[in-house]
Amino acid sequence: MLIGIVSFSGQYNHLIYRRVRELGVDARLFEQTFNASEVLNLYDGLILGGGPQNIPEDLSNLGHVVDYVLSSTKPLLGICLGHQIVSYVFGGIIGDGREFGITRIYVDDEDDILRGVGREINVWESHNKAVVKEPRGFKVLAHSDKVRVQALAHVRKPLYTLQFHPEVTHTDKGRLIFKNFIDLCRR
């Protein structure tokens, strides 16, 4: 099994790579300029990491990410910026939604990605923008007091997104979330 991790020059992308490897899965970290058609066949799943870009303003500078998001049938996990990219590509609305540091989120639906994390967990946040309206075809899995869309799952495709950072040790059950994603890639 091989998981691809797209780096958007975010401060935690190396930690995503490390967490996947700690779970005994091979992973490759690569830049946003990847070739979508090559990636579709190479990886069993893809993680879109965080970064300093703003959506929708910087979307055109993110290479073939949009092509991959729209065409992939393999599991995809968007984290922070990745959450916003996937949401926007499918018609969601991105707006103001600043959160930094430890934040309590409330799990409304565990679905596959949040399975076993419990009804409330502390997570690490680091974002100025947030998804303020989820895209059609997605369900909201979690919220916080400030941000209504903390986690999403597509209702038919294996697409999952998180506004928070499961890769940092400050996030409760982050390892379990990555294990859940890896299990989805094995199906």
Image (tube, rainbow, N blue to C red):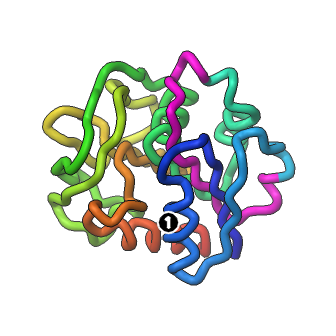
Q: Which residues are magenta?
A: 39-58
Residue 177 seen in render: yes
Instruction: Locate the C terminus and report the quarter of the image it occupies.
Output: bottom right
| x then y, percent, for residue 88 | 51, 27
Q: Residue at coordinates 25% horizontally, 36% vertically from top-left? A: 99
Of 101 and 66, nearer the camera is 101
**Which quarter of the figure has residue 121?**
bottom left
Of 119 and 23, nearer the camera is 23
| x then y, percent, for residue 62 | 68, 31
Q: Residue at coordinates 45% horizontally, 25% vertically from top-left? A: 92
| x then y, percent, for residue 18 | 54, 69
Q: Answer left or right for 157 relative to 39.
A: left
Residue 54 in the magenta stretch? The answer is: yes
Q: Answer left or right for 145 relative to 62.
A: left
The secondary structure making up most of the magenta span is loop
Residue 124 in the magenta stretch? The answer is: no
Q: Dot 1 lies on which element?
A: helix
Q: Answer left or right for 8 relative to 127.
A: right
Q: Residue furthest front?
A: 11
Q: Residues within 10 Å of mark 1 (few under 14, many from 20)?
A: many
Measured along the vertical axis of the image, is residue 63 above or below residue 72? above
Of 120 and 123, nearer the camera is 123
Q: Amino acid at mark 1?
A: Phe
Circle 1 sits on which residue?
Answer: 181
Measured along the vertical axis of the image, is residue 113 above or below residue 84? below
The mark total stands at: 1
Q: Residue at coordinates 83% horizontally, 43% vertically from top-left? A: 35
**Which quarter of the figure has residue 33?**
top right
